[in-house]
Image (cartoon, coloured by chain):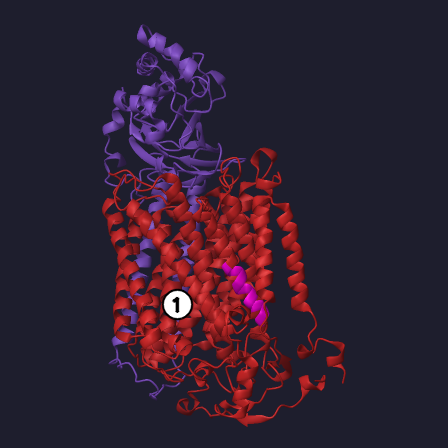
Chain colours: A red, B purple
Amino acid sequence: MTATDYERAPTVAIEDRNSALAEKLQALWETEPGFIGWLSTVDHKEIGIRYIVTAFAFLIAGGIEALVFRLQLAWPDRHLLGPEQYDQLFSTHGMTMIFLYAGPVLSGFSNYLWPLLLGARDMALPRLNALSYWIYLCAGIFLYAAFAIGFGPNDGWFNYVPYAARAYNGGPNIDFYSLGMILLGISTTVGSINFIVTFLRMRAPGMSINRVPILAWGTLTASAANIFAIPAVSLAFFLLWMDRNAGTHFFDVPSGGQPLLWQHLFWMFGHPWVYAIVLPAMGMVSDGLPVFCRRPLVGYTAVALGTVATMILGFGVWVHHMFATGLPSVSLSFFSAASIIIAVPSAIGVFAWIATIWLGRPVFTTAFLFFASFIVLFVIGGVSGYMTGSLPVDWQLTDTYFVVAHLHYVLIGINVFPVVGATYFWFPKFTGRMLDERMGRWNFWTMFVGFNLGFFPMHISGLLGMPRRIYTYADGMGWDWLNLITTVGSFVFAVGVLIFIVNVVVSYRRGRVAGDNPWDAPTLEWATTSPPPPYNFVVIPTVASRHPLWEDRLGEKSESQPHAGLVLDHGREAVGTDPLDAEPDIILKMPSDTLAPLALAIATTFVFVGLLGHWWWMVAVAAIATGAAIVVWLWPRPELGETAEARNV
Amino acid sequence: MLPSVCVAKAVAASSAPLNYLTSFGAKADATRPLTWGVTLISLAVIIIITLLVAGAIWRRPGLAPMAPGARIDVGPESGGLSWLWIGVGISSLVLLLSIVWTVSVLAEISRPGVKPALTIEVTGKQWWWQVRYLSDDPSRIFATANEIHIPTGQPVLFKLVGGDVIHSFWVPALAGKTDTIPGQTNETWLEAREPGIYRGQCTEYCGLEHAHMSLVVIAQSPSDFAAWEAHQIQSPAMPVGQAATGMSDFNMHCGSCHAVRGTAAAGILGPDLSHLMQRTTIAAGTLPNDPGHLAQWISDPQGIKPGALMQKPELSGQEFAAINAYLRTLQ
């Protein structure tokens, strides 16, 4: 191989799935069978599915935790749980849903879908992708190990100091949580970097920046936000760990530490993170809903820009979590106005989706029901957010169940509903089989009714003054019936989730065979087989519009070539394109499967285990192993053109 | 000898004593219309959007789910932008007006119309409220716990101190929340329109017994308040008989945490008990304050409020009875 290999003019061919080329690509890209192959794969589709399955496992765990404490709260003065048990349950529930489900499940979908949506062979940095998953898994196990041995987080997911300080929280609970969160932050950070680079460099030739599916915009903005937001929370947890273990005084009040420093660092991360775990899901709806409305999304440019604008404004509202902390009114009023104004870009999305349905001809699939109902749930979560944005009102309703209602409408309405809808939509692509539509109706209506029955009354218990995070309450407060209804609703909702899981399991084996494009959808992922081959596309597609598979019917000139394009078969290869116009400018050599990411993840995890137990020998050994894994990872490989010989012309 | 306001018509009688849709004081009065306003705007938005979504769905007969691989017509990409202009335009207008309304209410409530004459320091502690009435004259400073008396018709300044972890001071009928944060002193003010008992609650998660950390604000006419205040400043009457024995037992077993004005008991870790029997509840609103519940509390604080910092005292039967007798004299 020579340097010219990167700049050669590849041949162009028409896709033939039974050609020698397809066979050659299969041999090049296929993951080795067997356990070692399974551990060493860097295929984005494998990694994406693992992300989704793991995230759903955590969703189920977090859901069961919630059902247990809903039993406790079903009526007044129940003592099913003691206060410490309740505190660990609600904290672990929050941690699980926000960090181990909501973010990772979207990473899973985007990992699976991005290269297919963008017409690429893989993510830009496949090994980093594997590392991101393995560290996520290790961090999840680390955090849950604490819960399993009775030392789960007990200070809420927000983990305010000084209650999280050693003086008030003497057990290892908060050490587990702090270190686990720092570890998880590594996963999110490297994953985000991968999405950004992939977006900028891996789009199919011709997929200029105004032709990218909205899901890609959503995940891109979320990833860019993560790069700025994660350092704040990792730093906060590191400083807290230092306070607890090394005697520093960042948050230690008697020594001049500042409790509000924690809140600023946490919410500078926390609020952008909330947008990061909904924007990609909104992208799923923006891409999925139009397919069932039989017309393209109304206002593509506005929706894409609205996504970016939401994220930018999302960095200017964190103080609305701190309205009651005694900050000066003048600065609070700025954050209050920003928190209200952030609804404007959200309104763009809402009206674009409604107009898309209105002007289209809806097809009533289960996916459509989830996407369409999402609009209403999003608006309910949105207007309750607008209410909390109004400073004097927030002084009343903050830290009551009104906020619990708000955040669940946001997280379930804008994350879970789109994710389940997206599963109905893309499951055929993932598995080659359709999810059952009949069960789908049961699934949808049970979840929709259960969710609203369970969570809408929380608005009212909030307006009637029920505080958050109380493990029990006296009768005579006016909350009894509302709590009973909420508990019943949450169980109905859980049945809906159970139906979904049954549908997935049954349809995976027995579902109707899907074919390439069962929904007659317009984007590139539907131009390849279901499930796609390891190399995604036999030849690299060329794109000339936002809807390559609908061009003939949109009255546009049919210039996209989803089934004809570059032949790249000198080893694992992909095409690199420029960030704006997606003009191809280089051939990229892609890495093969390797155990290095797994080794690096395990070694890094043991650094954290050592820090947890103050086992310094383990920290030292694991740090050396971490270094070794990095060296193996980065060792120059001729097939990637990283050795001098390989680069010589 | 509870104040006559006990039976006043205020929120005590409400079926939901912590609700903030009703209001009984200047700050909450100013906030309530805004709360209702944004709530009604929100409900209107939900209804409008739901109708639009439903209308959009059922405007044209929906198509049956497609057969896999079928090709169905698709409409053109153009059109529909007027939805965005009109929808986002109206939304922006409503949002801007909400900001103006928000800021004007904020200006109204950020400071009282007249300078408060009374200053009360409230310290949030795990899991009760220490209340100190401040004065330039040290002999007029006194402490109580969990029940805050204020005069009606005038603003009262509250200095909020974090005693250990963060708590949040909230009396919804009178005003919104302000956190008590260690290392800083926050300020808020309350003004009650009419006499009444207004329930409050800690609303920042503060650990095990966050659920059992309530308080009441008892608003009295200025003359009733003055009488109450004068009584609080005095030391309780010296006990006699069994209660006198109880006092020395109390000082020995309880005095390192609790204080009783004018006696050797001067602890600061727990609530000041000088006029305990004037309070309506014990353990920060957990139990009604009557002799039976008081005895129950002393004999098993951990069973009633698990995690509370008060440990079960090691008392003989005689000591227990004597201490109870003594406490009942603390009028």
Q: Is residue B32 left or right of residue A120?
A: left
Q: In the image, is residue A241 part of the stretch drawn in magenta?
A: no
Residue A605, compared with residue A542, is above or below; it is above
User: Which residue has dot 1 on it?
Assistant: A419
Residue A8: x and y, percent? Answer: 67, 88
Quadrant that contains the C terminus of chain A: bottom right
Q: Is residue A317 visible?
A: no
Residue A629, compared with residue A467, is above or below; it is below
Q: In which image quadrant can residue B194 be found?
A: top left
Chain containing the residue with disc 1: A
Q: Which residues are magenta?
A: A126-137
Residue B105, compared with residue A169, is above or below; it is below
Q: Is residue A508 visible?
A: yes
Query: Which amino acid, by three-letter code, is at mark 1?
Result: Val
In-front residue for pair A93/B52: A93
In-front residue for pair A207/A143: A143
> Residue placed at 55% from the left, 64% from the top?
A132
> Residue placed at 53% from the left, 57% from the top?
A184
Q: In which image quadrant can residue A350 be found?
A: bottom left
> Residue placed at 57% from the left, 58% from the top?
A602
Residue A632, compared with residue A121, is above or below; it is above
How would you classify the magenta stretch by its main secondary structure? helix
Q: What kind of element bears circle 1?
A: helix
Q: Is residue A29 left or right of residue A410?
A: right
Residue A443: x and y, percent? Answer: 28, 67
In-front residue for pair A25/A392: A25
